[in-house]
Amino acid sequence: MTTTAASPAAGPRGITVAAAAWTAAAAVYAAMRLLAFVKLPVGGLELWSLSGAWQARVGIDDTRYVPTLYQALTALLLRIDDSETLPRLAALAASLTVPVSLFLLRRRIGEPAAIATLLVLAFDPLQIAFGPAATAAALDLPVIAASLAALAVLGPRPPVVAVAAFLLAAAGPLPLVLLLGAALAHPRVNWREPAAAIAAAAAALGVLAASFGFGAGWQGVTVPPFDLFAAGFDADWSTETARRLVALYAWGPAVLAGGYLAIRAARDRAGLFSDPLDRFAAAWFGLSLAWCVAAGGSRDPLPVLSLTASAAPLAGRGLAWLVESLGSADWRRAGWPLAGALLAAATLLGPLLDWARLGRVGPGSEVVAVVVLAGVIAGGLTLLLRWPATRPVAILPLAAAAAVPWLAGGFAVASGSPNEPLPSPVTTLQASEIRDIVAGPARDPSGIVAIHPSLADALTWPLRGSRGLVAASRIPPNASVVIWEAGGSPPDGFRVFEGRWAVLRERRGPDGGFLDYLRWLANRNTLPVRDLPAAVYIREQP
């Protein structure tokens, strides 16, 4: 499935079709992440990771400091500047190496498939949101892609194996799933080979460096991929659960990947996935899917991130196969069934959107019309599936139906829409303003800032660099500023400072079923907002 280079039409200075496709795909990939870098507020796993890195930077033990190699780098960068800008730039730079890695892998996986994989990653909401985010797992996908590219281009040379093993051992949990998938797909590993011993030694060095916090001090025995994997089951990194994030953002690439695997299995008469690359990709995708199922009730987005990352190469191969198959399809026979199905689908969309807007099913006549239109769609697709020469045409509308909601999510996340559940919960501008109050003239320089324990974690990052912060369930006598749960009366000797404050903002996805989901797809401004409120009290002057 490799493309043939087109002859330049304008002499030696012309470019090939493949070069133009790579340039366009890489530009889209970079543009979506640059938008997210500028637009997305700090929140969720990024807020947790930055808070842990800040605590390590000031020398405070905190369970939020894992550390992965990237989180240790974040703690170092925070010594230069205390904002999220430099850590995000480092994450963005790392994510921009993925197109280079895929370009190096193009001969192994096929050039059309590699370009399609890059486009899948470019538009995926999870990859967009976490690509430039300063999370503890920011290096996971870049390390995976770079390791595979280096091994494909250079082979298992000792330096390549050592660097890859060290980086994988010092990264987050996504490479762990990849390695387990490789072990399942290719179980016959000769552990007596020198490369295996080098990999084990380099991985042990990565674990040792993480255990010493990459210079921050002894953290206990730390294996970052396992530790971050385990932490996700009890974490509160997302407003939505993992299974809900799959339903809202990730089912498009998952369906495309699953569809390709089904087609590949049906066509592989010699044995299930005799192609080693398909077997490896299927194992990686299957384990990521199993992780999503096992952690479906957790508020951890990393299983969903692993699912879309592992689905991308399969979806890319499937899309490349589909495009190639459409070129040889019998369009003369497929034309009328396809046109009828598309016309029925366009007509069907009208009453469904109207029902979604109203929040209820319409009258009986509309229900009958919807059933008839659904039957026309099913009949048209059935006709297309009957003939081998038109089967790829039947897959096209199904792939489009899976891709459209997913693409809408990618654009909405990249543009920083405040109505997206994916990056929630996020910090607010009011949280930053509390930092100005704590450092401003309203505070008695000799007093401390008392923070209620329920707000302490949420305020670690917004109040970074502030002096005299104390988390306490009772207000200390020497407190001059109190940040407390909202709803109560001011403590004796204190006055309210400018009403209520919102520390975190949460936005959940649609809960009511298919019609609510469809309403959200058509109008993403329909979701309610919930804030974590706080009250700020200032000691009254005598």
Image (tube, helix red, strand yellow):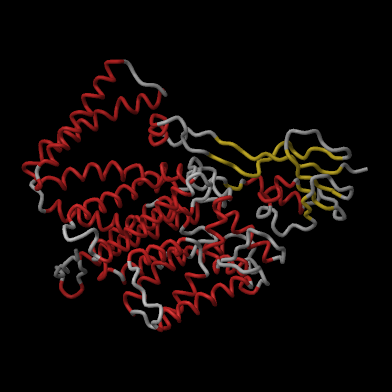
Q: Quadrant of residue 35?
A: bottom left
Q: Quadrant of residue 521?
A: top left
Residue lying furthest left: 332
Q: Position of residue 177 (x, y in %)?
A: 43, 61
Q: Is residue 119 above or below residue 356?
A: below
Q: How many marks?
A: 0
Residue lying furthest top: 364
Residue found 34% across the figure and 72% down from its top: 188
Residue found 10% across the figure and 47% down from its top: 388
Picture quarter with the C terminus: top right
Q: Position of residue 285 (x, y in %)?
A: 36, 56
Q: Position of residue 447 (x, y in %)?
A: 86, 53
Q: Is residue 225 left or right of residue 469?
A: left
Q: Quadrant of residue 13?
A: bottom left
Closer to the camera in the image, 236 or 542: 236
Q: Is residue 322 left or right of residue 22?
A: left
Residue found 23% across the figure and 32% down from its top: 345
Q: Is residue 422 left or right of residue 271?
A: right
Picture quarter with the N terminus: bottom left
Q: Position of residue 9 (x, y in %)?
A: 14, 68
Residue lying furthest right: 542
Q: Is residue 349 left or right of residue 77?
A: left
